[in-house]
Image (cartoon, grey):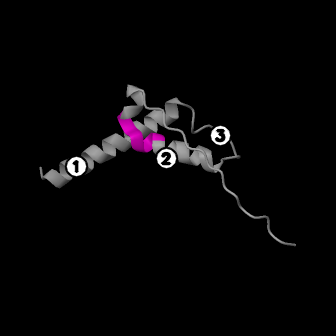
Amino acid sequence: MRAGSIGGLLLIIWLVLGGVAAYERGYFSDTSDTSCAEFGTIAVTTIAGPLNWMGVNPKITCDLDVPEPSK
């Protein structure tokens, strides 16, 4: 097996484990009101992978200052 194949396989396993951690924390609950912070937290939890079980608890806050549309 080539080194690139092993690296790709490890990356996929890493991200799957991150998705499992996000699922265990209830981040994929069926709510229609998904915010920027919630999406960001799911993303960084998935990227953190197995580190989630070693005490890493990434959270994202989004303070967007979006102007209101004019009428």
Name the amino acid, label 3. Asp
Q: Is the residue marked by circle 3 packed among few (<14), some (14-19), or many (20+) residues within 10 Å?
A: few
**Residue ID for mark 3:** 30
Question: Which residue is the extreme one toward the left?
Answer: 1
**Residue ID for mark 1:** 7
**Image-quadrant location for residue 14:** top left
x 48%, y 32%: residue: 57
Q: Is the residue marked by circle 2 packed among few (<14), some (14-19), or many (20+) residues within 10 Å?
A: some
Question: Which residue is the extreme one toward the right?
Answer: 71
Mark 1 or mark 3: name the one nearer the start of the chain. 1
Give x and y (percent) for residue 36: 62, 50
Q: Name the foreground residue: 18 vs 36.
A: 36
**Residue ID for mark 2:** 43
Magenta range is 45-50
Give the CA separation, mark 2 to mark 1: 21 Å
Do the residues under discs 1 and 3 have CB atoms within 8 angstroms? no
Q: Secondary structure at mark 1?
A: helix
Q: Is residue 54 left or right of residue 71?
A: left
